[in-house]
Image (tube, rainbow, N blue to C red):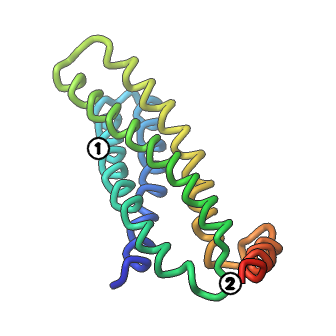
């Protein structure tokens, strides 16, 4: 398994995980279950660990695919920028989840505010995960690209440099 394959295997986990965690946390609020909300924290922590793995395998994946025909440096750069934002947001969500888990076990009275913060952070992560996932897919899947002229622009730029 090369770096590109490993990145493709790992990168779906934080994207799907943060959505599942959000839905579990939301359902914990709806049914008023602290156990369900605590489960959501575990899902967010796991998703953050997977985001770390996905982030650090991205460079190796880029090195493998950037010289393939039809691969756009513009799309890779766009994906990298979105991945940086998603990675930072996931680190914040994971840290907030760990702290909330600690406060839950210590039975601090302000833990309900921590859960609210985690819920808000998870909404932001779900939104950015859609963009980072789509931008990654667009790198190699021409059928989902919105603007196929990006490839032509990159190709014309490369030919000017030669």
Which residue occupies 66% across, 66% down?
75
Viewer-side residue, 89 vs 105: 89
Q: Residue furthest front?
A: 162
Which residue occupies 41% across, 73% down?
60
* 1 vs 2, front mark: 2
Left or right of 108? Residue 130 is right
**Quick check: 150 above or below 97?**
below
Residue at mark 1 to residue at mark 2: CA–CA distance: 40 Å
Q: Quadrant of residue 11?
A: bottom left
Q: Position of residue 37 (x, y in %)?
A: 35, 34
Residues at marks 1 and 2 touching, judged by CB atoms closer than 8 Å: no
**Quick check: 134 above or below 118?**
below
**Quick check: 156 above or below 16?**
below
Q: Quadrant of residue 110?
A: top left
Give the position of the C terminus as an image quadrant: bottom right
Q: Position of residue 51 (x, y in %)?
A: 39, 55
Viewer-side residue, 15 vs 111: 15
Q: Residues within 10 Å of mark 1 (few under 14, many from 20)?
A: some
Q: Residue furthest bottom?
A: 69
Judged from the image, the secondary structure of the residue bearing numbered disc 2 is loop
Give the position of the N terminus as an image quadrant: bottom left
Left or right of 42? Residue 68 is right
Q: Position of residue 77 (x, y in %)?
A: 61, 62
Which residue occupies 47% across, 76% down?
63
Viewer-side residue, 23 vs 110: 110
**Quick check: 25 above or below 62?**
above
Which residue occupies 62% across, 54% down?
131
Residue annotated with mark 1:
42
Residue 70: which numbered mark, if any?
A: 2
């Amino acid at each position: 398994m090369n770096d590109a394959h490993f990145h493709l295997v790992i990168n779906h986990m934080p994207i799907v995980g943060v959505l599942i965690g959000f839905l579990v946390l939301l359902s914990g609020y709806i049914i008023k279950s602290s156990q369900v909300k605590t489960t959501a924290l575990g899902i967010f922590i796991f998703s953050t660990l997977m985001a770390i793995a996905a982030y650090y395998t991205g460079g190796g994946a880029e090195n493998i695919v950037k010289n393939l025909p039809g691969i756009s440096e513009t799309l890779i750069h766009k994906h990298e920028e979105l991945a940086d934002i998603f990675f930072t947001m996931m680190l914040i969500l994971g840290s907030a989840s760990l702290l909330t888990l600690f406060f839950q076990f210590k039975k601090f009275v302000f833990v309900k505010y921590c859960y609210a913060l985690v819920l808000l952070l998870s909404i932001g992560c779900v939104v950015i995960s859609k963009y980072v996932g789509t931008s990654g897919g667009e790198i190699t899947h021409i059928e989902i690209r919105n603007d196929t002229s990006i490839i032509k622009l990159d190709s014309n730029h490369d030919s000017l440099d030669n």
